[in-house]
Amino acid sequence: MFDAASPPQRPPAPRRALCSFVLSVLCACACAGHAEAARLRIVAAEAVYGDIARQIAGTDAEVVSLMANPAGDPHLYEPGPAAARAVAGADVAIANGAGYEPWFDRLLSASGAPAKVVIRVDRLPGVVQGAQSGNNPHLWVDPASGPALASALVAALAARDPAHAAGYRARGAAFEDSTRPLAARVASLRAAFAARHPPLRFAATEPVLGPLLDALGVVTADPQVALAAQNETEPGPASLARLQADLDGHRVAALVFNAQVASPLSHALRARAEADGVPTIAVAETLPAELSWQQWLRQLLESVARAAGVA
C-alpha cells in the first residue's frame, strides 16, 4: 500500500551506479559532438596546400582538399555541389591564385560568407611567379611557398581559434624545421649549377617545374613552347624548331613534361628526347597521395640533380 507520508525509496546502489554511468556517457558524447562541431574548417583548392594545412592544423581543425585526384587533369576540374558546400562552410579557404583556379573565386562569391579568411598563395611574401617563365601558376614547386603558407596559416588559425593557438604555433615551428634540409639542398644545387659554363639549361613541354628551376638558377630553354602549352595555344614554328634542335644537339640537360596533361606535341617531344638520349623528368600538378609537400619537393629536387649529373 502506497503511503504518501513515507519518504521515497532510493533505487538500489547498482541501479544508481548504472544511471550515473549512462548520464556520464551521454554527457561525454554531447560534449564530444559539440567539440567536433566547433573545430575550424579549412578548405584548400589544391591537395598540396591541403597537406600543408593538415600539418599545421593537426587534430584541431578539419581540412578538405578539392582537387585531389592525381590521375585527373586539373585543367578539366569542375566543382560540384559538395565543393560549393565545403567552401561555403569553411572558416579558412586556401587558393593558389595566379589564374590557376578561377572557379574557386566563383565559389567564394556564391558562399555569402565574407567573414572567412582567404589565403592566396600568389600574394604571400617571398613567393615569386617565375622570373623566367612569366606568369607561372605552378607555385607549389616554389621552395618558398610551403613556409610562406605555413606561416600564414599559423597566424590565421591562432587568431580564429585562440584556444588551440599554442598547438598551431608548435606545429608551425615543426614544419619550418622540416623545410631546413630542403632549403640547404636548394642552396647547394644552385651553387653547383652556377659553376656550369655554359649555364645549365632544361627544356619543358609545359612550365610545371618553372618556379623550382628559377630557384635553382636553371635556364629554361625555348620557354615559348612551354608557355604556349600552358596557355593552350600552339607554339610558333621557329620556337618549336629551336627546341627540337636543342634536344638533338644535347644543348639541354633534360626535358620536363607534365605527367597529368598530355598532348600530341608533348608526346612527340618526349619521344624525341628519349630517342636523343636526353633525360626526361615527369612532373605532376597534383600532390601524390602518399607524399607530403616536403617529400614531393625533395623528390623533384633529386630528379633535377640526377638529370644534371650532380650527386
Image: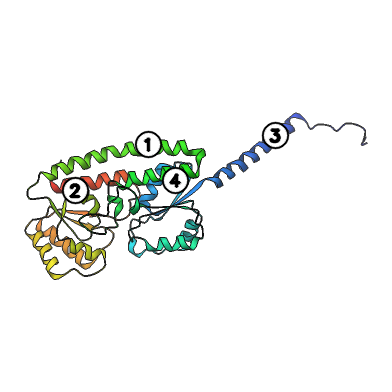
Q: Residues within 10 Å of mark 2 (few under 14, many from 20)?
A: many
Q: Can you identify the residue that label 1 sits on? A: 173
Q: Residues within 10 Å of mark 4 (few under 14, many from 20)?
A: some
Please identify, in this view, whether the residue under mark 3 or under mark 4 is nearer the observer.
4
The reply to whether callout 2 and callout 1 are in contact (CB within 8 Å) is no
Label 2 and label 1: CA atoms lie apart by 28 Å
Please identify, in this view, whether the residue under mark 3 or under mark 2 is nearer the observer.
2
Q: Can you identify the residue that label 2 sits on? A: 304
SS for callout 3: helix
**Where does the image place residue 213, in percent across and percent down from the top left?**
20, 51
Q: Can you identify the residue that label 3 sits on? A: 20
Label 3 and label 2: CA atoms lie apart by 64 Å
Please identify, in this view, whether the residue under mark 2 or under mark 1 is nearer the observer.
1
Label 4 and label 1: CA atoms lie apart by 15 Å
The image quadrant where one finds the C terminus is top left
Q: Residues within 10 Å of mark 3 (few under 14, many from 20)?
A: few
**Where does the image place residue 293, in percent across and percent down from the top left?**
32, 46
Which numbered dot is residue 156?
Answer: 4
Please identify, in this view, whether the residue under mark 4 or under mark 2 is nearer the observer.
4
